[in-house]
Image: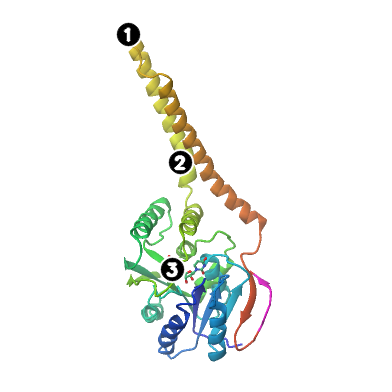
Amino acid sequence: MNNNIRYSVVIPVYNEDAVLEQTYRRLKQVMASTGEAYELIFVNDGSCDDSVDLIKGLCDRDPSVKLLSFSRNFGHQVAITAGMDYSRGAAVVVIDADLQDPPELILEMIDKWKAGYEVVYAQRKQRKGETFFKKQTAHLFYRFLNASTDIDIPVDTGDFRLIDRKVCDILKQLPEKNRYVRGLVSWVGFKQTAVEYDRDPRLAGESKYPLKKMIKLCLDGLTSFSFKPIKLASYSGAGLIALGFVYLVFLLLFKIVGSSAIGGWNLVLVGEMVLTGFLLLMMGIMGEYIGRIYDETRNRPLYVVGESYHQEEKERNVMKIG
Ligand code: UDP
Ligand code: MG
C-alpha cells in the first residue's frame, strides 16, 4: 500500500457514463500538474448504466484510479462519506462527476491548504444551466438553514471542497446516518476559507437530484442542525391560544353592544381546517425528527460496498460495510 498519497479526490458517481471519460481526463490533467502523488476514488452509488465498466477500464489503464462500488443506490452524501473513509491523502477533495465543479479550481484550493487552511470550500457566485426553480429553492434553503442554526454553514456552497486529513479523520468518527456532509464539515471547525467560482452547466446527462432527493437533503440539513422546526409547535401553539382569547374578547364586546356576532358554521369549518392542517403539519415535522432518531438507534451500517477495484489489490466481490 502506498501511504505517501498527498491528494485524494473523491468522485460520487450515479449513472454518469456520458461524462466519466471527460471528467477523468480533466481531473488527471489538473492532478498531474501538482507533481505530487494522488488517487482518484470513484464511488459508484448503485449506477445501472455503464459507469462501473468505464471506471474499471480507467483502473486498468491508470494505477491512481480506484473504484468503490456500492451494492445499491445509497445516496450522494453517503457516497461522499464512503470515499472519505477509503481516502488516504493528506488532503481530500470532493468533486461532482458531472464537471459542474471545474477541476481546475482544485489547484487554487491546494494553494490555500498549503497556506494553512484546513477546509477550503468552493462558493458559487453563479449557477449556469440550472432551472429557475432549482436556483431559487437552493438560494432560499441555504439562507433559511443559516438563519436556523448557530453553526456558521456558509451559503451557496455544495460539497465541492478540500479538507485536511485531520478534518477527514474527525468526520469519519461522526456516526450519524442522515448525513448533511457540508454542515458536518462546518461543525468540525478549524481554519476554513472559501474560493469563489461560477458553476458550469452539467456536461451531459440529467441531474441525479430529483425533487424527492432535494427535499430529503434539505430536511437532513435542517433536522441535523436546527431544532427550530420542531419548536414551531410550541411557539405557534402559544400564538393560537392568544389569538383565541382576543377573538373571545371581541365576541363578548359585540354581545355587550348588542350586534349579532359574525360567524356561523362556515367560520367554524374554516378554523377547523386550518387548525387540523396545522396540527398534521406539526406531527409531520415531529415525524421527521423521530424517524431520524429511529434510524440512529437501529445502528445499521451507512453503506454496503459490493466491490472495490484497483490495480494494487484487485478485490472483487468483497462485502464491506461502513
Ligand atoms: N449522485 C450520487 N448519488 C445519487 C445522486 C447523485 O452519487 O443518488 C452524484 C452524481 O453522480 C454527481 C453528484 O452526486 O456526481 C451530484 O449530483 P447531480 O449533479 O445530479 O446534482 P445537481 O448538480 O443537479 O444538484
Ligand atoms: Mg450536477
Q: Nearer the viewer, mark 2 or mark 1?
A: 1
> Is 55 one of the magenta-colored residues?
no
Residue pictured at 65% horizontal, 64% vertical: 301
**Does the beta carbon at disc 3 come under 8 Å from ligand 1?**
yes
Q: Nearer the viewer, mark 3 or mark 2?
A: 3
The amino acid sitting under disc 3 is Glu
**Does the beta carbon at disc 2 come under 8 Å from ligand 1?**
no
For the record, the magenta segment spans 315-321
- Residue that carries the numbered disc 1 in the rendered image: 258
Say which label, 3 or 2, has the lower sequence index.
Answer: 3
Numbered circle sitting on residue 206: 3
Above or below 88: residue 276: above
Residue 310 in view, yes or no: yes
Instruction: Name the spot of residue 69 as percent of width and height, x first.
Output: 60, 75
Residue pictured at 45% horizontal, 26% vertical: 269
Instruction: Name the spot of residue 28 as percent of width and height, x first.
Output: 44, 86
Question: Mark 1 near mark 3, Cβ–Cβ under 8 Å?
Answer: no
Above or below 187: residue 106: below
> Is 320 one of the magenta-colored residues?
yes
Say which label, 2 or 1, has the lower sequence index.
Answer: 2
The amino acid sitting under disc 1 is Gly
**Quadrant (top left, top right, bottom left, bottom right) of the N terminus:** bottom right
Neighbourhood count class around disc 2 (C-alpha, 10 Å): few under 14, some 14–19, many 20 upward:
few
Identify the element where label 1 is drawn.
loop
For the residues labelled 2 and 1, the Cα–Cα distance comes to 38 Å
- Residue that carries the numbered disc 2 in the rendered image: 232
Identify the element where label 3 is drawn.
loop
The amino acid sitting under disc 2 is Leu
For the residues labelled 3 and 2, the Cα–Cα distance comes to 37 Å
